Amino acid sequence: MLPYFSSIKKSLISLLGFLILFLLINEFQSVWSAKITLIEQVLYGLLVATAVLASYFNRSRLALSATLFLLFYLNLSSTLPWNEWLLAQSDWLILFLASVLAVLSLVKDRGLLSIHGLYRLLLLSAVGLICYYWLNSQTDVQATLASFPILADYLKYVSIELPLLCCAALLLWQTLREKSLVTTALLSSFAVWLGHYYQVIDLPWSVLLTLITFHYLLVVLVDSYFFAYRDELTGLPSRRALNQLALALGRKYTLAMLDIDHFKKFNDTYGHDIGDQVLKLVASKLAQVKGGGKVFRYGGEEFTIIFSGKSPEQALPLLEAVRQAVQDYKVVIRQAQRKTKKSRTGKNTSNVKTVSVTISIGVAARVDKLNFEQTLKQADQALYRAKKSGRNNVSQ
């Protein structure tokens, strides 16, 4: 549950930040209106840089979206061969870009300079064709729907509003399901796109696209940070984040090294999938530690908790509570059973087994003339003593 809630919180904060920035831009138009010419000139390079940076960090969905917004802005500010056609196909343009944002929320980020990039371009081309034929078939569609009297008052919404509503629902669903900052950015872009179309937003496109571009850049940077400093499996800060925190620690702190007891044997017996579930379970329990403890995945089945400004006497009850919480939680393991001559029902049968997971903890406090690495080594030695004394205990 820990990665789920942390991801939801991350998405909500991203959307809230985007909304606040939009409201500030709308409220203080006098601040940037005098520099609108500069914004219009800088925007080209900003969109190109965003597309390149997003592609470099394998955020291909943002790269494609930024590229489409760049083409759209070029169409607004210069004479291109397709300008006249787009002016005559404004409904198609609205529907196409909205549909692209929704479709991009469904696909995974892949490298654009590969076969996947070609697949993405073919997919976007297919979306464009579908939108074109949908709009050109409205005479037949509405004639068919007109035979249902209950739909008579809603026929005018079928061509544009209905597909836009479907795209909005899809984007909302994907934002909640995927819990990714990329889908959050696609959703905010979609909201701006529709807001301008329905004249709810009257800011110039140069300002709106600058806002969208900064959101994309922020997502790329934040995702890169989490990739570097967060453990993907457990959602906890990684060892690299621990090393960064060590540079900012004061003179007084207590450090605990934790290890899952018999984890290798557990992994060999029940498989790596169950082992991963156990790691997530232990991580979620450790993350509930009180007293301001900061939890990190050190590596493998080892974790680290740092209590800044606390003595071992203050930290020990908190660590004991965590140890007890892990021990008390029962892990349910289901293993598929092979069919026998006595069992020919065709249904999947399984063995259900409940096991307990325990952890051993070693504690050390930073004292004079000891640096972080030496304190960590002392905690590791205390962990070794905890294992030698029977495991499932806290040793200092």
Image (spheres, rainbow, N blue to C red):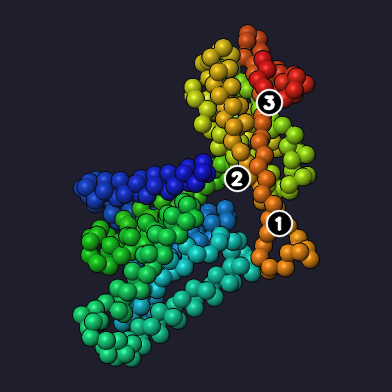
Which residue is found at the position 59% from the left and 36% from the top? Answer: 329
Residue beneath disc 3: 392
Front one among 320 and 100: 320
- N-term-proximal mark, 1 vs 2: 2
The answer to whether residue 387 is left or right of residue 312 is right
Q: Position of residue 76 (x, y in %)?
A: 33, 69
Mark 1: few, some, or many residues within 10 Å (few <14, many ≥20)? few
Residue beneath disc 2: 232
Q: Is residue 105 above or below residue 369?
A: below
Number of the front mark, 3 or 1: 1
Front one among 320 and 140: 320
- N-term-proximal mark, 3 vs 1: 1
Q: Is residue 89 above or below residue 347?
A: below
Quadrant that contains the C terminus: top right
Amino acid carrying label 3: it is Asn
Amino acid carrying label 2: it is Glu
Number of the front mark, 1 or 2: 1
- N-term-proximal mark, 2 vs 3: 2
Q: CA distance from mark 1 to mark 2?
A: 28 Å
Q: Position of residue 182 (x, y in %)?
A: 47, 55
Residue beneath disc 1: 336
Q: CA distance from mark 3 to mark 1?
A: 30 Å
Please tell me in which quadrant of the rendered image residue 97 appears: bottom left
Mark 3: few, some, or many residues within 10 Å (few <14, many ≥20)? many
Determine whether the residue tagged by mark 3 lies in a helix, strand or loop. Answer: loop
- Can residue 250 be seen here? The reply is no
Please tell me in which quadrant of the rendered image residue 184 appears: bottom left
Q: Is residue 342 above or below residue 356?
A: below
Amino acid carrying label 1: it is Ala
